[in-house]
Image (cartoon, rainbow, N blue to C red):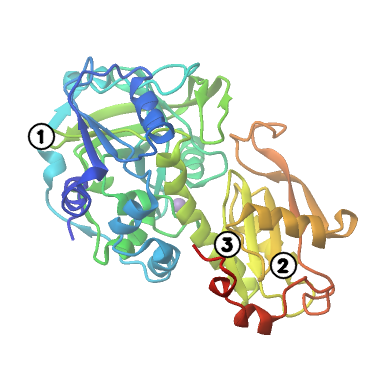
Amino acid sequence: MGQDLRSFLDLVKRKKPDDLVIVSREVNPAYEITALAAKLDREGKRRPVLVFENVRGTSFPVLTNLHASRSRLAASINTPPDEMLRKYLRAMEKPIPPTVVSTGPVKEVVKKGAEIDLYALPQIVHHQGDAGPYITAAISFARDLEDEIWNCAYNRLMIQGRDRTSIHLTTGKHLWEFHRKAEAKSQPLPVAFAIGVHPAIALGSLAIGSIDEDERAIMGGLFGEPLELVKCETSDVLVPAHAEMVIEAEILPHQRVAEGPFGEFTGYSLGERQREVVQVNAITHRRGAFFQDIAVAHLDHLLLSTIPMEANLYRAVRAMVPSLRAVRVPSPFTCYVSIEQRIPGQAKNAIMAVLGADLYMKRVVVVDHDVDVFDDRQMTWAIGTRCQPDRDITIVTNARGSDLDPSSRDDGYTAKWGVDATAKPSLAAYTPRHRVPPEVWTRIKLEDFGLSK
Ligand code: MN
C-alpha cells in the first residue's frame, strides 16, 4: 500500500475523479482558501480535495479539504464508511510497530541554516481575527527524553519568524507532558512536524489512549503494514519517509511567546495566550511538495478527529458495559452512548467510562438501545421522556478538560456532567411506547389503499 499522500490522490483520481479539484487561478492565502472550501461546501454542497496550484507569495501548491468526506476517509483505510470504527478499533488492538528505512522521498530537498525560511511556505490565514498565518496540518513526532515512548499529535503552529513558530500543546496531554519533563531539566525537546501525509497517518496520529500507546503503530495497523520512518537530519526523531514535507525542530525550555487569537474547532476564537516556542533546525521536502492545510473548524477538521475519538470511547465503555451498542461524538466535548442495559447502574458506569477515557469529554448522554444515537430528535426525546434531572444527572466538579473550551473557568479547569436518559427501572418495565399492532403493520399494504406512488 502506498504510504504517501500522492498514491492516495491517485486512488481518488481513479475511483472518484470529481473528488479532486485543481484550481489554477491565483488565490490569496489570507482567508481565500478557507472561504472557497467553506463556500463550496455550503453553496455547492461539495467537499472535494482542493489543490490550489497558484498561491500568492509561495511556490508551494496548497492542498486542503482532504478529510472532508467520510467515504474518502474510509477509502483511505480500505474499508466501507460504516466499518470505519471497527477497523480503527482493530488497529488499536493489533498495532503494527513502525520500521526504519535509510532514506525516502521526504529527503529530496534538504534546507538547513540560512536556507530555512518559513515565510517561503504558504502564509495561510484562516479566519477573521486570527493573529497571523498558521500551519494547521502539522503532525508532531516526538520522543520522551527519558523513555522510549513516542507521541504523535496535531499541533497548530503560528509562524513567528523565518525559523520560529509558537506551538499549542494541549494542556495535560502527551506532548505537553514530554515538554514539561524536558523543561524541568532545562532541555529543549526535539520534535519534527510532518505536513502532507496519507490520511491513514492523519487518522492514526489522533488516536486517544494512554501515553505509552504508540500512534505510529496504530498508523501501521491502519495501513496493514509497518509505517516507514526515516531519521531527521538534525536529531534522532523519526518521521514518515513519504511525507510531503517535514519541519525539524525543538521546543525550547522556559520560553514563551504571544500566540492567538485563533479560531478553533469549537467554533470560537480564543484570545491571545503565552505559548511554547519552536526553533526550526531544518526543512526537508519532496520535489514539488504539496503544502497541506486543514480548514479549521470545518468538516476537514471535525470528521478526521471524530473517528479516533469514537473508537477510543467505544473501547472504554465496552470495558465497563459489555452490552454497549453505539457511541457518537456529535459535537465538541459531547458523547452519546446507547447500551442494552441488563441491570440498573450500567448507564452510570458508561458515563464514568467516557469521562475517564477522554480529556475532552464534558457531557455524556446514555440512552437505551431502542434509541438511535445518530438521530438528534430521538436523543432529545429520550432526555425529555426518560430522565428526571434531580435523579439522573451527575456532575463532576473541578476536573481537567479542553483548554480550548471557552466556557471553562481557567483554560480547561472545568465541570463535567453525565445524563442517564435510560428508562428506569428498566426499558422492559417502563411505560410502553405506542405502536400499531405488529400483525397489522405487516399485513397492511399502501398499494391496497391507493397510497403508493
Ligand atoms: Mn499519545
Q: Given the image, on which type of amino acid does mark 2 rest?
A: Asn
Question: Local crowd at mark 2 within 10 Å, few (<14), some, or many (≥20)?
Answer: some
How far is the residue under mark 3 from the one under mark 2?
14 Å
Which residue lies under the disc numbered 3?
Answer: 327
Which residue lies under the disc numbered 1?
Answer: 287
- The image quadrant where one finds the N terminus is bottom left
Using the rendered image of the protein, determine whether residue 289 is visible from the camera's viewpoint: yes
Q: Given the image, on which type of amino acid does mark 3 rest?
A: Val
In depth, the one of 9 and 188 nearer the eye is 9
Which residue lies under the disc numbered 2?
Answer: 349
Identify whether 436 is placed above or below 43.
below
Local SS, label 1: loop
Q: Position of residue 143 (x, y in %)?
A: 37, 48
Question: Mark 1 near mark 2, Cβ–Cβ under 8 Å?
Answer: no
Q: Residue at 63% of width from left, 57% of height from top?
A: 336
Q: Position of residue 422 (x, y in %)?
A: 76, 66
Q: Residue furthest bottom?
A: 439
Q: Looking at the image, is mark 1 or mark 3 earlier in the sequence?
A: 1
How far is the residue under mark 1 from the one under mark 3?
42 Å
Q: Looking at the image, is mark 1 or mark 2 earlier in the sequence?
A: 1
In depth, the one of 10 and 161 nearer the eye is 10
Does residue 174 appear to the left or right of 242 in the view shown?
A: right
Q: Given the image, on which type of amino acid does mark 1 rest?
A: Arg
